[in-house]
Image (cartoon, rainbow, N blue to C red):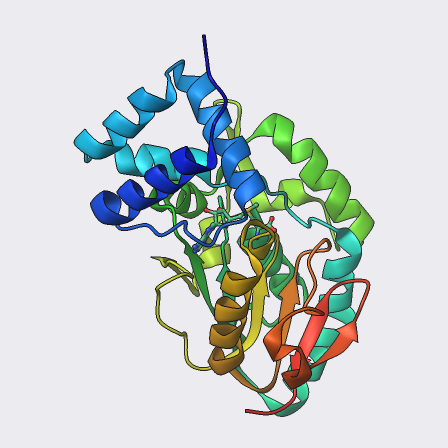
């Protein structure tokens, strides 16, 4: 019989993953971490003891575990009104003071957010004025982001979002169909560097004008959110922008007073001072 997952199990798993695989989930939100562990047990049809033993003894299992423990759900033009705010307010405001600028996509998952941004920049005629870093903790998902190949059935939702965003053309103009997949036009990502980067213990990216870290910190506890937000604050130019997910907020964070809210609905903040 499968027994309940105890807090002691989660602590043990976290300790092994940190010691053996160098990923630190200590400050991830406990409830979603537990749900993901439960999902892994079901997926692999194994007991908690077997999971512990695999993590302890199989070095190659670390990356598989990482892919399963992290939530990679994403869409192109997710929350279309957010992308509209970027196009109509945020990016024009950056361009007032900077001819060229830098963006950091922190937790870019399989890259849909990155393609959305490059399409937006292309349609604004400024794709070559912008360099971007697209980072994620998970190397497997980063490979997918770089490949830019998505199931055609996912493109239906992406296209709906793009229409709601009021893009200039059709998403179909940005990909070719091959073996049931949409293969994105690689020239869109010519100024994007994809890099494995762990927000928990990774360095800063100096200095960027806009950080998108959407639907990532929702999986962190308050203490880790504070640590990561401090890094974002340091990585931004003065008056740089930070965008987080629609269900996330800076309200309870230590650093809140160093940002002003630009859009409460779209969760866009602006750095006030160093
Ligand atoms: C739900 S996806 C968000 C994707 C995209 N930003 C969006 O809003 O659609 C969360 C991503 O955060 C990444 N992630 C989780 N923990 C991370 C960490 N410590 N450092 C960097 N990325 C992390 C996961 O691998 C996953 O790809």
Observer-nearest residue: 54 or 105? Answer: 54
* 3 vs 162, nearest the viewer: 3
Q: How many marks?
A: 0
- Note whether 19 is above or below 210 in the view shown: above
In this rendering, position of residue 76 left or right of residue 164: left
Q: Is residue 150 visible?
A: no
> Who is closer to the viewer here, 267 or 165?
267
**Location of residue 139 with respect to 211 vertically, above or below:** above
Going 40% across and 13% down the picture, which residue do you hit? 45
Q: Quadrant of the N terminus?
A: top left
Residue at the spot 28% in from the left edge and 37% down from the top edge: 62
**Image check: 22 left or right of 113?**
left
Whole-percent x, y for residue 232 in the image: 51, 74
Could you say where residue 20 lies in the image, as x and y percent from the top left? 21, 44
Q: Where residue 139 sits in the image (x, y, percent)?
A: 34, 46
Q: Position of residue 204 (x, y in %)?
A: 40, 74
Query: On the image, which quarter does residue 259 sit in?
Result: bottom right
Q: Quadrant of residue 250?
A: bottom right
Left or right: residue 95 compared with residue 194: right
Q: Quarter of the image containing the C terminus? A: bottom right
Q: Quadrant of residue 120?
A: bottom right
Q: Is 6 above or below relative to 238?
A: above
Task: In the rendered view, tell whether residue 218 sits above or below residue 38.
Answer: below
Say if residue 274 shows up in the picture: yes
């Amino acid at each position: 019989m499968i027994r309940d997952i105890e807090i002691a199990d989660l602590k043990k798993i976290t300790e092994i993953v940190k010691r053996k695989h160098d990923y630190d989930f200590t400050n991830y939100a406990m409830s979603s971490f537990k749900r993901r562990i439960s999902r892994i047990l079901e997926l692999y049809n194994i007991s908690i003891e077997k999971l512990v033993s695999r993590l302890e003894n199989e070095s190659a299992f670390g990356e598989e575990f990482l892919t399963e423990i992290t939530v990679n759900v994403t869409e192109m033009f997710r929350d279309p009104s957010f992308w509209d705010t970027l196009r109509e307010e945020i990016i024009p405001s950056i361009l007032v003071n900077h001819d060229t600028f830098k963006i950091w996509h922190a937790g870019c998952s399989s890259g849909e957010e990155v393609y959305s941004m490059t399409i937006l920049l292309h349609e604004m005629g400024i794709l070559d004025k912008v360099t971007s870093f697209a980072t994620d903790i998970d190397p497997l998902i980063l490979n997918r982001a770089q490949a830019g190949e998505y199931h055609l059935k996912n493109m239906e939702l992406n296209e709906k979002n793009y229409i709601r965003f009021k893009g200039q053309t059709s998403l179909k103009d940005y990909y070719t169909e091959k073996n049931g997949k949409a293969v994105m036009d690689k020239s869109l990502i010519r100024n994007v560097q994809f890099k494995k980067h762990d927000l928990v213990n990774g360095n800063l990216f100096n200095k960027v004008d806009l950080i998108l870290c959407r639907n990532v910190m929702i999986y962190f506890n308050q203490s880790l959110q504070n640590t990561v937000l401090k890094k974002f604050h340091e990585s931004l130019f003065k008056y740089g922008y930070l965008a987080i997910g629609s269900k996330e907020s800076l309200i309870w964070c230590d650093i809140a007073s160093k940002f002003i809210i630009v859009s409460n609905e779209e969760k866009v903040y602006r750095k006030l001072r160093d």
